[in-house]
Image (tube, helix red, strand yellow):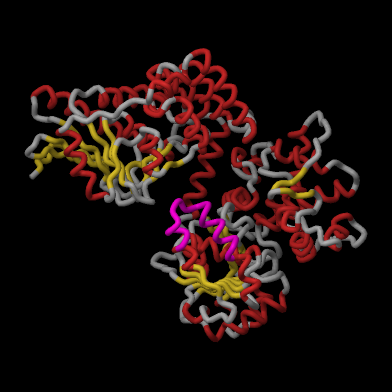
């Protein structure tokens, strides 16, 4: 039996007969727990109670748990960041939080954190201020510091405490990449002290940890040696070199600021924790963090688009080429039972081979790979159609072929099943002409490589109603993708804006400009790869097909057309504009240029111009949806907030 001592808005605290305190966080009216300012102020009051009760003997220890099924604590309340009109008040707010966590850590009684699900950012910083940590060892548990993805780094003392626990090299690597760890990996880095199999074991193990007064051990001395003055500067420079390979300091300053903080204070975890306060403030109010927060909120908004209650278990994919096969593999990876159809087993087998590679890369255990392969069934005769909740066509971009397929399967569908095309450019109304009920057909346009790019364009034709589109969005969310609803129009959103950009660069290569220079300029601007390398990655034949569908000319005597005629289709054939080796483009050195970023801005201008056009035409519902769609679909510089935001800010 436990006695309720304090009931607050965000926390519940009780003491049982053994004098163990049970502190549970449960953020009201929210799917996940976050550390808002109000929650932290309540925690401050509770810690004061703990200090008093440990003195009187009323309390022998505290176990911190979450009341949410989703996990422990997802981090600070990001929504509050933008409510700060004056970031000069941030240092005082951070100092107060540091003091709360330090008072918790300074308690003489043991404080134990029981972790399940997400334990991220500020949530991990709070757990690290506890004396001992227990985590559920399952697939749902994820532990880490993703702050770098928001343009900042840990600010509640987490940088110092992580280095104290894991050692400088491992801790910095995780913080600089924003990588989320499974429970076992977190245990290996000393972030977690004990693993349990189930969530319902956390309380029992927490009780034992309190009664036995367990405390976490710090990093081994040999790991701490990496932070000694002579070594630290060398390591910091290596870290800067690695960071520069991924993103320049001007675009993403947070990793470099964290490295500077480590170089200055890396041998004293307390000094490093204190140093966070001054180092993080200019980042928080800067344009990169502001734009990355905008991207975060827009991506969260996409998760609310799906039709509630929609459930999916079986998927049938028609077309086992690169796109169809990879869509099928991804659906199987996400737990769906998938049937994959093509003319014969010989055409399906390469897709199965690629799927196995994906599963081996994503799963740690052989039985998980085997189970995923069992979920993916070759189906040359289409026997999976009548049982499927979702049917996706992903064959060549030829109208008559698609129409033939859909007219053949329409009568076999079960009631309520989604019928979708993965067309990259053909208007749905034209494809749906072959159907008795054209309202059933929606577009689900995936992007290559399917396993890496998060976007799915959910295409709405003039025949579709809200329920059909809501189902399509719900399916995209069910397989871990981000749906953006777009109107059926040539090229939809992403291909419509990409084509002028890519073809403009191709024309410059045709005129004699260096493809390596053009690609380097686009990357310098902030794109993940240059337009020529992108054309090779998409496939020159696919690029030509989409270009023609959108009304762009591809002259027969052009280098572009000649490469296609020679079967040099880019990455998939081993040669296109570039030769490809081991999945990478073989490039010559780019010639010097006085203003790479300026050249990149010039190259990207057609993309930004066309984004404005599609917004004006109503292809997407808002400039914000255009921004998140283009970021997720093309990799457009997230630190600029998207093409519309970049144009508004005078950066594109």
Left or right of 439? Residue 47 is left
Q: Which residue: 64% across, 33% down?
A: 245
Left or right of 588? Residue 171 is left
User: Residue 526 lies in magenta, yes or no?
Assistant: no
User: Residue 361 lies in magenta, yes or no?
Assistant: yes
Quadrant the C terminus occupies? top right
- Residue 339, percent from left and from top: 53, 73
- Residue 38, percent from left and from top: 31, 35
Left or right of 309? Residue 105 is left
Relative to 24, say whether 319 is above or below: below
Quadrant the N terminus occupies? top left
Q: Nearer the viewer, residue 492 or 166?
A: 166
Q: Nearer the viewer, residue 385 or 427?
A: 385
- Magenta stretch: dominant secondary structure: helix
- Region of the chain picked out in magenta, as a range: 352-370
Q: Which residue: 72% across, 50% down?
A: 534
Using the rendered image of the protein, determine whether residue 401 is visible from the camera's viewpoint.
yes
Q: Which residue: 20% across, 26% down?
A: 48
- Residue 236, percent from left and from top: 55, 22
């Amino acid at each position: 039996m436990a006695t309720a001592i304090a009931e607050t808005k965000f926390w519940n605290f009780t003491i049982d007969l053994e004098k163990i305190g049970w502190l549970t966080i449960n953020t009201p009216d929210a799917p996940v727990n976050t550390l808002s300012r109000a929650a932290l102020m309540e925690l401050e009051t509770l810690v004061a109670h703990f200090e008093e009760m440990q003195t009187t003997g009323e309390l022998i220890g505290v176990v911190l748990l979450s009341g949410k099924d989703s996990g422990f604590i997802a981090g600070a309340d990001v929504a509050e960041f933008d409510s700060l009109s004056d970031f000069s008040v941030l240092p005082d707010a951070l100092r107060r939080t540091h003091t709360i966590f330090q008072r918790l850590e300074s308690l003489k009684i043991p404080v134990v954190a029981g972790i399940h699900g997400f334990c991220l950012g500020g949530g991990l910083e709070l757990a690290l201020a506890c004396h001992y940590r227990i985590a559920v060892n399952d697939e749902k548990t994820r532990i880490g510091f993703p702050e770098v993805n928001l343009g900042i780094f840990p600010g509640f003392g987490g940088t110092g405490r992580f280095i104290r626990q894991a050692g400088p090299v491992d801790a910095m690597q995780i913080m600089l990449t924003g990588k989320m760890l499974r429970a076992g990996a977190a245990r290996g880095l000393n972030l977690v002290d004990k693993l349990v199999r189930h969530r319902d074991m956390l309380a029992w193990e927490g009780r034992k940890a309190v009664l036995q007064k367990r405390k976490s051990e710090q990093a081994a001395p040999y790991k701490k040696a990496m932070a000694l003055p002579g070594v630290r500067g060398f390591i910091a420079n290596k870290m800067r070199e690695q960071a520069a390979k991924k993103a320049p300091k001007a675009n993403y300053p947070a990793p470099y600021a964290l490295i500077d903080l480590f170089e200055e204070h890396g041998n004293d975890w307390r000094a490093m924790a204190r140093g966070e306060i001054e180092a993080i403030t200019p980042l928080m109010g800067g344009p990169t963090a502001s734009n990355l927060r905008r991207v975060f909120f827009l991506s969260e908004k996409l998760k609310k688009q799906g039709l509630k209650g929609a459930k999916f278990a079986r998927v049938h994919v028609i077309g086992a080429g690169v796109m169809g096969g990879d869509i099928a593999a991804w659906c199987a990876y996400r737990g769906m039972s998938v049937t994959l159809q093509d003319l014969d087993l010989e055409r399906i087998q390469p897709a199965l081979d690629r799927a196995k590679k994906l599963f081996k890369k994503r799963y740690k255990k052989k039985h998980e790979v085997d189970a995923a392969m069992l979920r993916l069934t070759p189906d040359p005769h289409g026997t999976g159609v009548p049982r499927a909740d979702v049917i996706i066509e992903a064959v060549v971009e030829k109208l008559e072929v698609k129409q033939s397929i859909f007219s053949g399967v329409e009568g076999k569908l079960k009631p309520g099943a989604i019928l979708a095309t993965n067309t990259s450019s053909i208007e749905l109304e034209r494809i749906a002409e072959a159907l008795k009920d054209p309202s059933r057909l929606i577009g689900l346009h995936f992007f290559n490589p399917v396993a890496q790019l998060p976007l799915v364009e959910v295409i709405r034709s003039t025949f579709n109603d809200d329920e059909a589109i809501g189902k399509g969005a719900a399916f995209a969310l069910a397989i871990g993708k981000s749906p953006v609803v777009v109107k059926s129009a040539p090229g939809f959103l992403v291909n419509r804006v990409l084509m002028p950009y890519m073809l403009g660069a191709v024309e410059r290569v045709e005129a004699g400009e260096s493809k390596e220079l053009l690609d380097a300029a686009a990357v310098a601007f902030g794109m993940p790869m240059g337009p020529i390398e992108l054309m090779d990655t998409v496939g020159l034949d696919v690029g030509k097909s989409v270009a023609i569908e959108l009304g762009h000319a591809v002259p027969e005597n052009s280098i572009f057309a000649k490469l296609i005629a020679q079967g040099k289709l880019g990455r998939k054939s081993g040669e296109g504009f570039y030769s490809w080796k081991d999945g990478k483009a073989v490039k010559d050195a780019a010639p010097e240029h006085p203003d790479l970023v300026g050249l990149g801005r010039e190259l990207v201008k057609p993309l930004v111009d066309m984004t404005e056009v599609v917004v004006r035409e109503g292809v997407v519902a808002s400039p914000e949806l255009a921004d998140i769609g283009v970021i997720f679909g093309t990799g457009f510089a997230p630190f600029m907030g998207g093409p519309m935001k970049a144009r508004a800010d005078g950066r594109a």
